[in-house]
Amino acid sequence: MGGNESAMNPWLFMAINMTVVFAVLAVLGVIMVLTHKLDPTKKKPSEPAKNVAPAAAPVTAAAPVVANDEPVVAAITGAIVAMGYSSDQIASIRPASTSRNWRLDGRLSGRY
């Protein structure tokens, strides 16, 4: 019996380590599910009020669209709708005020 009898079989060592890792992952999964179900900050669904007329959608005037900007407006609207908003919620699309450096960079690169 010459050798180190206290050395553990590598396969047994791997099996014990994998069991510990997956047991911890399972416990964390259970904790996440419980936290999700017991979340005190989650908004509770409110029951619809009876005999209440539905609220009218706000009417917003759309900004006039220049003929060259229609593809840009369509792309921006599509991106906003893809984010989960409806096209009725978009009030207006207008360029933000840009800094002097950005305008200068655009002019120097030939974009303006």
Image: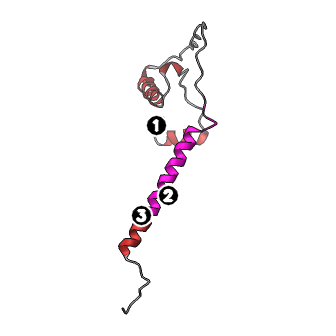
Part of the protein shown in magenta? 19-42
- Residue under the point 53% across and 21% down: 89
Mark 1 element type: loop
Numbered mark located on residue 18 in the image: 3
Identify which residue, 19 or 46, lies in the foreground.
19
Give how far across and how far down residue 6 sits, in percent.
44, 83
Where disc 2 sits, the SS reads: helix
Q: Amino acid at mark 1?
A: Arg
* Residue type at the position of mark 2: Val
Magenta stretch holds residue 1:
no
Would you say the magenta stretch is mainly helix, strand or loop? Answer: helix
Image-based side of 56 in relation to 108, left or right: right
Disc 2 crowd, CA 10 A, few/some/many (<14, 14-19, 20+): few
Mark 2 or mark 1, whichever is nearer to me: 2
| Residue type pointed to by label 3 | Met
Rendered-image quadrant of the N terminus: bottom left
Q: Which mark is residue 111?
A: 1
**Residue pictured at 37% horizontal, 77% vertical:** 9
Q: Position of residue 63 (x, y in %)?
A: 54, 17
Q: Quadrant of residue 71?
A: top left
